[in-house]
């Protein structure tokens, strides 16, 4: 898991930095949220389609990872609160025909709740008028506490570093630098949201 996390985060960091630096170098402050279609890039069309498929695969995987704690919390809480309700607690075995008797277990509550959650969040995302700006604001707000602060504090506690040791101070310095980066990113996102609100006219008829 340590190796998988290192390789995954390293790859993601490289691609994110490349997109950010190349986009800013090419477009400056007018960099579009979608570097390909937002910049008028439509040829070759297959390249744009491949890029969109890659984005979809990335978001589907990331969505599963980040949604699992919510799924687990709700399902565990419901099982503890209604242990006698079979709809919540019972798993049903379903056999797939023509596959040698292969079967899997389905919990109807889990299937219903997760499907409803995905549908509601999808509709809310579609209704957001400034998806890129709001997404950047949410990312800036959640990056430092979830990705940096908590893992660093847990690692320091697990490794039992002395309070003012070199390792502890370096990790705290890294956490502080990431906090500053998050604050700057959040400020930029708020400024972008304000600018989007100024130019947003939902009922304006376009010629």
Image: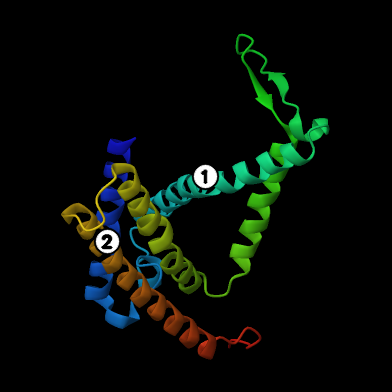
Q: Earlier in the sequence, mark 2 or mark 1?
A: 1
Residue 29, disc: none
In the rendering, at what x and y percent does residue 77 appear? Answer: 69, 43
Q: Quadrant of residue 73?
A: top right
Which residue corresponds to the image point at 36% horizontal and 70% vertical from the top-left?
182
Q: Residue extending furthest bottom?
A: 198
Q: Is residue 89 visible?
A: yes
65 or 152, which is in the foreground? 152
Q: Secondary structure at mark 2?
A: helix
Rendered image coloring scheme: rainbow
Q: Residue 64: give its label.
A: 1
Q: Nearer the viewer, residue 177 or 123?
A: 177
Q: Position of residue 54 (x, y in %)?
A: 40, 49
From the image, state whether disc 2 or disc 1 is nearer to you: 2
Name the spot of residue 32 as percent of width and height, x first: 38, 74
Q: Is residue 80 above or below residue 147?
A: above
Res 48 seen here: no
**Which quadrant, please, contains the C terminus?**
bottom right
Local SS, label 1: helix
14 left or right of 184? left
* Residue furthest top as drawn: 100
- If the image is split into quadrants, where does the N terminus sit? top left
Q: Position of residue 23 (x, y in %)?
A: 28, 70
Residue drawn at (64%, 12%), measured in percent from left and top?
98
CA–CA distance in space, label 2 to label 1: 30 Å
Residue at figure coordinates x 34%, y 81% from the top left: 30
Toward the viewer: 19 or 108?
108
How crowded pointer 2 is (Cα within 10 Å; few <14, some 14-19, many 20+) is rated as some
22 left or right of 76 in image: left
Disc 1: CA contacts within 10 A as few (<14), some (14-19) or many (>=20): few
User: In the picture provided, is 59 more to the left or to the right than 11?
Assistant: right
- Report the residue marked by disc 2: 172
């Amino acid at each position: 898991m340590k190796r998988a996390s290192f390789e995954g985060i390293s790859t993601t960091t490289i691609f994110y930095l490349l997109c950010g630096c190349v986009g800013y170098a090419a477009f400056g402050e007018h960099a579009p949220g979608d570097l390909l279609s937002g910049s008028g890039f439509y040829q070759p069309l297959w390249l744009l389609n491949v890029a969109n498929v890659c984005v979809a695969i990335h978001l589907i995987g990331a969505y599963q990872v980040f949604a699992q704690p919510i799924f687990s919390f709700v399902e565990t809480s419901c099982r503890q609160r209604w242990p006698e309700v079979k709809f919540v607690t019972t798993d049903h075995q379903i056999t797939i025909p023509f596959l040698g008797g292969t079967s899997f277990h389905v919990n109807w509550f889990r299937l219903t709740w997760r499907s409803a959650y995905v549908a509601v969040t999808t509709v809310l995302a579609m209704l957001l008028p400034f998806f890129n700006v709001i997404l950047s604001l949410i990312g800036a707000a959640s990056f430092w506490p979830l990705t940096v602060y908590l893992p660093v504090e847990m690692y320091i506690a697990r490794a039992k570093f002395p309070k003012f040791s070199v390792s502890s101070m370096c990790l705290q310095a890294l956490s502080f630098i990431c906090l500053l980066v998050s604050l700057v990113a959040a400020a930029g996102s708020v400024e972008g949201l304000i600018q989007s609100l100024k130019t947003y006219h939902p009922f304006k008829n376009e010629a």
